[in-house]
Image (tube, rainbow, N blue to C red):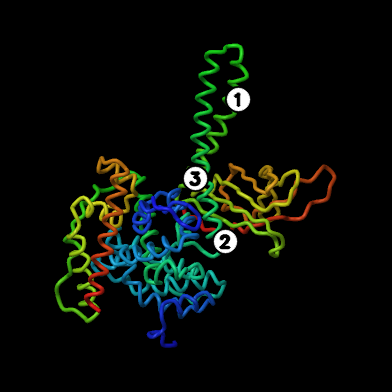
Amino acid sequence: MADFSEVPDHQLLQQITQEQESALEALYTRYATSVFSLAMFMLRQPPLAEEVTQDVFLNIWRKAATFKADRGEPKAWIMSIAHHRIVDVIRSRRRAPPITEPREFDLLELLPSSGASTEEQVERNLDRERIVKALSNLPEAQQQVVILAYFEGYSQSEMAEKLQQPLGTVKTRVRLAMQKLRTILEDYGTEQS
Amino acid sequence: MAQNNLSNEPHPDDLLGSYALDALDHVEEAQVEAHLDGCLLCRQTVSRLLQVATQLGQSVSPSTPSPQLQSRIMEAVRRERGQSVPSAAPAHSIRSGFGFGRRISRVLVPVAGVLLLILGLSLVYNVSLTRQVERLEMESVSVSARLFNFSTENAQLLDALRQQEVSSYLMANPASQPMLLESPQGAGDSQGVLLVSDDGRHAILMVAGMPPGPGYQVWLLRSGEKIPMGQVEVDSTGWGAKNLYLPEPLFRFDKVELRPTAADGDSEPSKILEGKISSMRRSK
């Protein structure tokens, strides 16, 4: 198999449009853990998380040609496909009768795990620390809408209902929260470089 | 909202953050997507917001999928390409793409956009129909002489409203599966989408770019059997839509075809659109 370790993501996507299976395998190697981890975190069921991960990579295979570079990097595209699919599953399950009580989200769940770490693990833990710190910097109401929307799959109108707040208030909170997160995370990026 | 200087269309500032978090409903999402197509400024904003969302997604505790998952995915890919599959563990079921989501295939992107637009229009249409029905009901009480006429009209509107509600539900349901109908051998500009319910018993057929004509007969085919499913009318722009209530799940058939409605005694007209049902997957 060819060595794809130096091939940029967008080139792999290009090769997928030419039906090169090895390019998909290379993207799988890069992103399967991220996709599966997000699915596991949000769905909490390994078989379902694997099914979603399979869907995501099959859809990358089918839809690589629709990737638009002006809407973000390939990594963001892949993670957004994954998140979109997971949210679809969560919303369809929410419409079904509940099997268990909904869990309460805890920011602490995002904190880095301890133990022996590879270089990649250390880097990942630093990323997670940055995110937790950035989220902690938001006012509680803004923190709440980001968590409900991103990690629990609530839509704006569902959040308004759950939080018993006007829809306009929820929209404003999301907008301010995302602006603030963007600024904080971009500042971290600048500091790093 | 701020204004887009090029088109005077307002920027959906309030929706971009929620768009990046997948917190919009289908109609709002379609509005944002349509705006993004023509607005570089908002595309840049969304690109940065998606980076934030990606970082959120990558912040969760890492978990590792089973070692067999990669081979299952590659098997599924090979199956799609029609190649022979090496023997291995059985593949898990594959759900259809992303419904009306934002990351759609090169063929389904425009189709999904159309579906979302239709969903939005049908919701607006629903509200309009409901208001009409209410107005008609009030008039029928006050003017007893016109009661009969109004009640007939009322029933038709209610029926139309019901049809729209059913269609909206089917479009909004992520379990619904779209199937593309294309001109045979790529001839002509006609295209269509069949959106099928999870159980395969109900579908909405939408066609566009159809040549003008008296109407098109919808056929379901399987070995040695050809079942008429009614006629779809198209307007002067070539657009038409029809709700199909199927005698048995669609997945039991092989193909869908549309042919111009033939007058008695005419030979069978040529196919205008066709789609292979076998390309869809049963989710139940």
Q: Secondary structure at mark 3?
A: helix
Position of A122 relative to A54 (above/below)? below
Residue that protrudes farthest toward the bottom in the picture = A2
Q: Earlier in the sequence, mark 2 or mark 3?
A: 3
Residue that badge 1 annotates? B153
What residue appears at the point 61 percent right and 15 percent down from the top-left corner?
B146
Q: Which mark is residue B8?
A: none
Q: Earlier in the sequence, mark 1 or mark 2?
A: 1
Depth check, mark 3 against mark 1: the one in front is: 3
Residue that protrudes farthest toward the right in the picture = B265
What residue appears at the point 24 percent right and 47 percent down from the top-left corner?
A101
Q: Secondary structure at mark 2?
A: helix
Asked whether residue B247 is in view, the answer is no
The amino acid type of the residue labelled 1 equals Glu
Residue that badge 3 annotates? B120
In the image, A138: left or right of B146?
Answer: left
Disc 2 crowd, CA 10 A, few/some/many (<14, 14-19, 20+): few
Residue that badge 2 annotates? B279
Disc 1 crowd, CA 10 A, few/some/many (<14, 14-19, 20+): some
The amino acid type of the residue labelled 3 equals Gly
Q: CA distance from mark 1 to mark 2?
A: 41 Å
The amino acid type of the residue labelled 2 equals Ser
- Front residue of this view, candidates A52 and B214: B214
Q: Is circle 3 on the same chain as circle 1?
A: yes
- Front residue of this view, candidates B57 and B258: B57
Q: Secondary structure at mark 1?
A: helix
Q: CA distance from mark 2 to mark 3?
A: 28 Å
